[in-house]
Image (cartoon, helix red, strand yellow):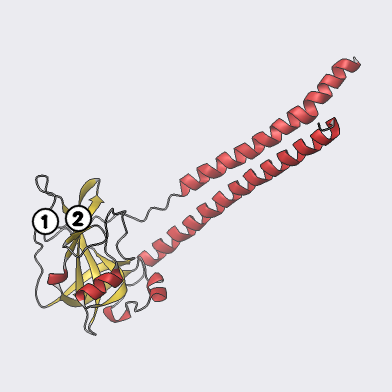
């Protein structure tokens, strides 16, 4: 059995450790919130920069990271036989497909263009509408984006037109194209049966601020309980006994 003095030391150390840990977690959440605020500022700043030209588009991953969310003007030729439909993609809360077609550039490389969103056929989920793809040289406006977001899939990636995800390295081997390490969201009004109301990047600052408040509140609660039970309450009880 611990003596009363030893027990007070153990309680004090435990309370200090818990209060310090929860306070540190609160600071960590505030730091995560600030990181996302900084990210949003970078996205906003890049969004108003002059459009990149075709010859300025990134050729390696580090360069691509610095171009994400920038406007871009592309000129090239579609590779329609390589069009794929990414399943389980939503736009404005509706399920459907992202239609992806490579655009071959003048230097022989290609960039994956997310051309827009197509709704799913309510009667046959494996049916897709063919998207008109102009022959010859085309120009389009877009926004540089990371490769299409990956969703969880229960089976190995396939090479069908309808698929869950698109791995750029595997897709390059499949098509024989030299792909740039990024994709482009085609922008502009709806056309060719495709909608282009692309979602904005989710910068959820409020969630981290809420977590920080919870951690700080828990830290304050631990400190308050320690002060009450270890300092104020014994002092009050001692005062009553002395009176």
Residue 137 on image: x %, y %: 14, 78
The part of the image, by quadrant, that contains residue 77 is bottom left
Q: Is 190 above or below relative to 238?
A: below
Name the secondary structure under disc 1.
loop
The label shown at residue 128 is 1
Quadrant the C terminus occupies? top right
- In this figure, which residue is indicated by the disc labeled 2? 97
The part of the image, by quadrant, that contains residue 219 is top right
| Residue closer to the observer: 158 or 66 | 158
**Mark 2, residues whose alpha carbon is within 10 Å: few (<14), some, or many (≥20)?**
many
Residue name at image x 75 percent, y 41 percent: 13
Residue name at image x 24 percent, y 47 percent: 92
Residue 241 on image: x %, y %: 88, 16
Q: For the residues labelled 1 and 2, say whether their Cβ atoms are less than 8 Å apart.
A: yes
Name the secondary structure under disc 2.
strand
**Which residue is the extreme one toward the bottom?**
107
Quadrant the N terminus occupies? top right
| Residue closer to the observer: 130 or 185 | 130
Q: In this view, does 115 lie to the left or right of 239?
A: left
**Which residue is the extreme one toward the right?**
242
Q: How far apart are marks 1 and 2 (CA)?
A: 8 Å
Going from the N terminus, do you reach mark 1 or mark 2 first? 2
The part of the image, by quadrant, that contains residue 87 is bottom left
Q: Is 208 above or below relative to 50?
A: above
Q: In this view, does 190 lie to the left or right of 214?
A: left
**Mark 1, residues whose alpha carbon is within 10 Å: few (<14), some, or many (≥20)?**
some
């Amino acid at each position: 059995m611990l003596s009363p003095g030893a027990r007070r030391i153990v309680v004090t150390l435990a309370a200090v450790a818990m209060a310090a840990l929860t306070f540190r977690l609160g600071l960590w959440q505030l730091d995560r919130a600030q990181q996302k605020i900084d990210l949003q500022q970078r996205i906003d700043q890049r969004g108003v920069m002059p459009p990149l030209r075709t010859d300025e588009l990134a050729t390696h991953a580090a360069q691509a990271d610095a171009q994400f969310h920038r406007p871009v003007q592309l000129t090239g030729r579609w590779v329609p036989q390589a069009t794929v439909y990414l399943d389980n993609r939503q736009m404005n809360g509706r399920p459907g497909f992202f239609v992806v077609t490579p655009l071959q550039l003048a230097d022989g490389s290609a960039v994956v263009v997310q051309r827009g969103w197509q709704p799913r056929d309510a009667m046959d989920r494996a049916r897709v509408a063919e998207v008109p793809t102009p022959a010859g040289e085309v120009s389009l406006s877009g926004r540089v984006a990371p490769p299409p977001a990956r969703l969880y899939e229960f089976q190995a990636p396939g090479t069908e037109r309808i698929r869950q995800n698109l791995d750029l390295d595997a897709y390059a081997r499949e098509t024989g194209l030299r792909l740039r390490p990024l994709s482009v969201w085609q922008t502009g009004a709806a056309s060719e049966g495709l909608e282009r109301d692309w979602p904005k990047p989710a910068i959820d600052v409020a969630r981290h601020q809420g977590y920080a408040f919870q951690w700080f509140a828990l830290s304050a609660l631990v400190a308050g309980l320690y002060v009450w039970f270890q300092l104020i309450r014994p002092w009050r009880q001692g005062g009553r006994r002395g009176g």
